[in-house]
Amino acid sequence: MTQPLLSIDDLHKSYGSEEVLEGVGLEMDQGDVTVLIGPSGSGKSTLLRCVNRLTEINSGRIALDGEDVTGADTDVNELRKQVGMVFQDFNLFAHLTALENVTLGPKKVLGMDAADAEAAGRTHLEQVGLLEQADSYPAELSGGQKQRVGIARALAMDPELLLFDEPTSALDPELVGEVVEVMRDLAAEGITMLVVSHEMDFARSAASDIVFLDDGEVVEHGPPEQLFQNPTADRTEQFLSRLH
Ligand code: ADP
Ligand code: MG
C-alpha cells in the first residue's frame, strides 16, 4: 500500500479557550483534489494554516509523505517549499512586477540563479495565461489576473501540495471564471490540491473528494457525486441547500 501524501489525524487546535478544530482527520493521495466546504467560522482556514505551519496545532498529527511536520525539529522553510499556498487576498508584493513576484521565491528560497528563475517564471505565467502581463505591477492587473499571478507564484516553487484558501471569494463575479479555469487545468494535470471553496462547479467537475467541515469537525467526506446527491448527514444537507 502506498502511503498518503498528506495524512491528518485527530487534529486539535484552540485559540485561547476556543477549540476551533476538534479532532479532524483527513488523508490525501498524490493527485487528489480535495475541496473543503463549510460555514464561515467552521475552521477551514485554520486547518489549511496548520498544514503549512502558519499556525501551531495543540495535538494530533499532520504528516507529509509519512513524516510528521508539526514537531519542533521540522524545518518550516523546507515544509513551505513542499506545501504552497494561494490566499484569498492574493498577498502579492505591490512594488514587484508579476514576473518578479513569481521569481522571488525560487531565487531567494530555492537559490535558483536569476536567468533560470526568469525562464521558469515565464513558463508559469504562461500556464496561467499571463505571459503578456509579466512586466505589469499588481495595481495594473484585475483581481482575476492578480490571483492568477498568485497561483503562478505558488507553482514556481514546484510544491508537492497546493493549498487554496477561498481563492475566488475576493473577486467580482465576472472574474471568478478565469481563476476557476486555471485551477481546473492544474487539477487535470495531476497537481495535488486542498481547496477551500464554495465554487460548486469547480467542486463537481474537478474534486476527487469533498470534505464538509462544521464546528471544527469533519461531518462528511466523500466523492462529489455522493456528497452532493446523497449527503448522509442532516447538517450537510442543510448547508448545501443554503448555498444555492
Ligand atoms: P473559516 O475559514 O471556516 O471561516 P477560521 O478557521 O477562519 O474559519 O476560524 C475558525 C474560528 O477560529 C472562528 O471562530 C475564528 O473567529 C477563530 N479564529 C481564527 N483565527 C483566529 C486567530 N488568529 N485568533 C483567534 N481566533 C481565531
Ligand atoms: Mg476562512
Image: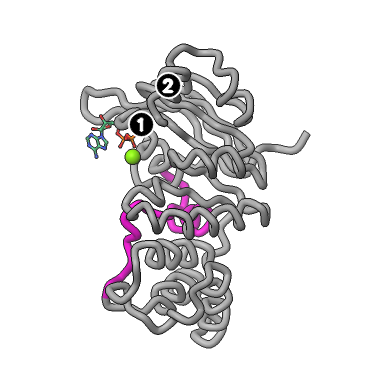
Q: Is residue 33 above or below residue 168?
A: above
Q: Is residue 126 above or below residue 61?
A: below
Residue 132 percent location from the top left of the image: 48, 82
How many tags in the picture? Answer: 2
Q: Is 75 colored magenta in this rendering?
A: yes
Please, which residue is most extreme toward the right here? 1
Q: Is residue 65 above or below residue 227?
A: below
Residue 208 percent location from the top left of the image: 64, 37
- Please tell me how crowded label 2 is: few (under 14), some (14-19), or many (20+) other residues with Cα within 10 Å: many
**Is the C-beta separation of discs 1 and 2 under 8 Å?**
no
Pointer 1 residue: 43
Q: Observer-nearest residue: 10 or 118?
A: 118
The residue positioned 61% from the left and 44% from the top of the image is 206
Pointer 2 residue: 217
From which residue to which does the magenta span run?
71-94
Q: Identify the amino acid type marked 2.
A: Glu
The residue positioned 34% from the left and 72% from the top of the image is 141
Instruction: Report how far apart the C-alphas of labels 1 and 2 lie in the structure.
Output: 8 Å
Q: Is residue 195 above or below residue 104?
A: above
Residue 84 percent location from the top left of the image: 48, 55
| One can see residue 99 in this view | yes
Q: Observer-nearest residue: 190 or 108?
A: 190
Q: Identify the amino acid type marked 1.
A: Gly
Hey, which quadrant is residue 39 in on the image? Answer: top left
Q: Observer-nearest residue: 142 or 109?
A: 142
Mark 1 and ligand 1: say if the CB distance to the nearest ligand atom is below 8 Å: yes
Residue 145 percent location from the top left of the image: 41, 67
Q: Which SS class for mark 2?
A: strand
Quarter holding the C terminus is top left
Please, which residue is most extreme toward the left here? 16
Query: Which badge, 1 or 2, is on the more N-terminal residue?
Result: 1
Quarter holding the N terminus is top right
